[in-house]
Image (cartoon, rainbow, N blue to C red):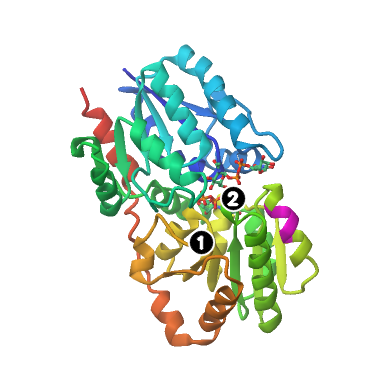
Amino acid sequence: MKKNLIVFGTRPEAIKMAPLVQEFKKHSDIFETRVCVTAQHREMLDQVLDFFNIQPEYDLNLMKANQNLYSLTADIIIGLKEVLEDFKPDYVYVHGDTTTTMAASLASFYSGAKICHVEAGLRTNFKRTPFPEEMNRQLTGRIADYHFAPTEASKENLLKENIASETILVTGNTVIDALIDSSKRVEDIYNLEIENLKKIVKKDVKTILVTGHRRENHGDGFIRICEALREIALINQDVEIIYPVHLNPNVKRPVYEILSGIDNIKLIEPLAYPAFVWLMDKSYLIITDSGGVQEEAPSLGKPVLVMRESTERPEAVVAGTVILVGTNKELIVNEANKLLNDEDKYTRMSVLHNPYGDGKACERIVNYISNLE
Ligand code: UD1
Ligand code: UDP
């Protein structure tokens, strides 16, 4: 039996690792698979665990209100020591670019386990953008033994850093596995959040879906983002903006201060994954700084304005379904107005497009690990 430990801590990691947990659990004849959550996020993580019906064997329960990177990093390394010593995994799976990813990789390296990096090789090559994710991802790439790259471009990035090609597998992004699975399941279940959303998403009104949380946008960046959203709402009274606000206090504070009380802006709690996917599908346009949303939206044919200066996910920008607008107020307002009023531009950007995967990423990862000596 090969022993697998799958480690994650935040909402996006959970969404993207859930299908891998399920895939490994199908092969319990050759793998003993356990899940460890750091709970870098709490409520937003639990929403995902509930939906995918995952009961972690280990829960470090680390989240603190308004936590800082220093203590979070240290707590993850210390917390994982016990888990690694208890289970003694052969393989540890980490995902993407969070502090959980980087700290768990380092702890696993100390333990002697082989480190498998899911969603490897994305790069902006700007050390501080996104912050601290670009460095988290590069450091994890250095430590990892196996690299599951979502696209050919991410594989190329790894090859340029002299990562041995036989340790890299292009898999597609597991987010598409999750998206396909949840789109199917959501049709069969009664979902209270979706029923509530149906009351605010009106058929004849264009819905703009907004999310945002990046650390490098905290402060002035978020103020400009909120001012842009207020202007879009005031100019376009016939449009409804729905914004599930991230629980980070550095996001919640300016968002509620600047955007409360505007009739056509609805500030709501973070949605559980199936309701968020439903809302993406019903939206006319998405404005976000999220990594995961940039990957999901093109496969739903939704144009996206990305509130970042650079992206480690260039595929959809090249395909023309994503435009980078940074946190420049004028640019956000102008691009949103163009998409609301210029039908040709909107149609060109809303072509269904799926550069990020075919829903079989987890199957490929499990096959690859099964075939290792
Ligand atoms: C983290 C990740 C980021 C990822 C994002 C996804 C790092 C450094 N950042 O950013 O890469 O894109 O998650 O959303 O790894 N909070 C709650 N409840 C929750 C979640 C967060 O109250 O369920 C609040 C807490 O006060 C917490 C704060 O948000 O201290 C910040 O959480 P943290 O994980 O440090 O940063 P994020 O901005 O969420
Ligand atoms: N998401 C969600 N509920 C929300 C907002 C987003 O389930 O209210 C999902 C979204 O579908 C995507 C992921 O969360 O899969 C993105 O998470 P986030 O933007 O927090 O992090 P990032 O992807 O930027 O790391």
Q: Nearer the viewer, residue 198 or 133?
A: 133
Looking at this rendering, what residue extends furthest in the right direction? Answer: 261
Q: Residue at x 53, y 59 (%)?
A: 289
Looking at this rendering, what residue extends furthest in the top direction? Answer: 86
Q: Residue at x 70, y 58 (%)?
A: 268
**Vertical arrangement, residue 113 with respect to residue 227, above or below:** above
Please give the label number shown on residue 366.
none
Is 111 displayed left or right of 70 in the figure? left
Occupied quadrant, residue 227: bottom right
- Pointer 2 local density, CA inside 10 Å: few below 14, some 14–19, many at least 20: some
Q: Quadrant of the C terminus?
A: top left
**Vertical arrangement, residue 328 with respect to residue 25, above or below:** below
Q: Quadrant of the N terminus?
A: top left
Dot placed on the residue nearer the N-terminal end, 1 or 2: 2
**Residue 59, image x, y percentages:** 58, 26
* Residue at the disc numbered 2: 215
Is 162 displayed left or right of 216 in the figure? left
Amino acid carrying label 1: it is Arg
**Residue 133, image x, y percentages:** 48, 45
* Residue at the disc numbered 1: 308
Query: Marks 1 and 2: CB-CB under 8 Å?
Result: no
**Residue 50, image x, y percentages:** 58, 39
Q: Residue at x 47, y 86 (%)?
A: 343
Under tag 2, what secondary structure? helix
Q: Which residues are magenta?
A: 251-255
Q: From mark 1 to mark 2, how far is it between C-alphas?
A: 11 Å
- Pointer 1 local density, CA inside 10 Å: few below 14, some 14–19, many at least 20: many
Disc 2 CB within 8 Å of nearest ligand 1 atom:
yes
Amino acid carrying label 2: it is Arg
**Residue 66, image x, y percentages:** 70, 40
Occupied quadrant, residue 121: top left
What predominant SS class does the magenta segment belong to? Answer: helix
